[in-house]
Amino acid sequence: MVNSQSEPEDVSEVDTAILDAELFIKYKAPEKAMERLRTAIERNPRSIPLREQLRGIFITSKHNEEAARQCLGLASIYIEREDFNTAHERLLEAKDLDPRINIAGGLEAIRRARRPDLSPAATRTESTPGRTYATFAGDLAVISVFDAIQVLENARLTGELLLTGDSKTGRVFFNEGRIVDAESAGTKGEVGFRRVVEITNGSFEFQKSAETFPVTIQALSNTNLLLDTLRQLDESALAGGN
């Protein structure tokens, strides 16, 4: 995350840097434009206009890794400014630009900011005597469900992720790393997955399967599903507060 204690933005310098960058672009000198914006960002690290301008130039110039990093920085700033929709967009864009990026931390930050009632309980240090974990297992107070999903997606595993919380349990089913179904609290599919995401304390374990599961959830990707789920949780919280 970007340090929130940075100096206030120098609006005049920001405007000048953007105009300079646009001039370099006009005369087909994108590297100079990038250099000018980077210098300005060093002095104004929390400037959204500067970072958005640099992000756009990186994308146009096919510097996808650099563009993805700017997207992550922008997402951090948007979260702090409670512009969660734009933060979602930048996280998804970062993942599209560089599939190697793990955006689980950003998703967790959005969830904590939007739904403090879903913050995990204090980290547990005790272990469960006699418990034998499966292929992949851990404590949800240490490893979030987002991180667990990312690991399973990257490993392209097929199987069942079981989450056991203090008051509820849930299951998420994967075919080669893609989420295809979920169930929790008597609900299945996307509604069931939303209930699973609300489980923030307890433990999880993954059991591999030799057989694939029926596809109930038709999301374009795990990231899209996670982002849509977070939006639904937020809308539900707002509706409940009215």
Image: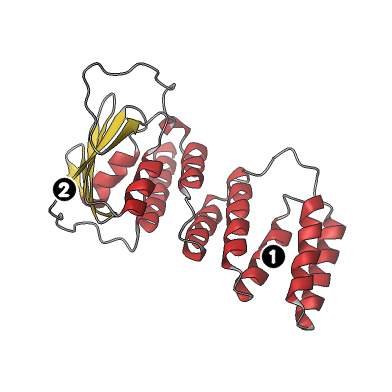
For badge 1, the amino acid type reads Leu
Q: Which residue is mark 2?
A: 209
Residue drawn at the location 19% of the way across and 57% of the way down: 216
Extreme bottom residue here? 27
Q: SS class of the residue under badge 1?
A: helix
Q: Does label 1 or label 2 sit earlier along the sequence?
A: 1
Check the image and report above or below for 88 versus 162: below
Identify the residue position indicated by label 1 in the image: 54
User: Dot 1, how many residues are within 10 Å of its Cα: few (below 14), some (14-19), or many (20+)?
Assistant: many
* The quarter of the displayed image where residue 239 is located: top left
Total residue callouts? 2
Quadrant placement of the N terminus: top right
Q: Which sits in the foreground, 162 or 242?
A: 162
Q: Nearer the viewer, mark 1 or mark 2?
A: 2
| Relative to 114, 180 lies left or right | left
Q: Are marks 1 and 2 in contact (CB under 8 Å)?
A: no
**Alpha carbon separation for disc pair 1 and 2:** 45 Å
Q: Position of residue 127 (x, y in %)?
A: 32, 18
Question: Residue 103 at what x, y percent from top left?
Answer: 48, 50
Amino acid type of the residue that numbered disc 2 sits on in the rendered structure: Ser
Image spot of residue 237 (x, y percent): 41, 40
**In the image: residue 124, left or right of residue 45:** left
Mark 2 crowdedness (10 Å alpha carbons): few <14, some 14-19, many ≥20: some
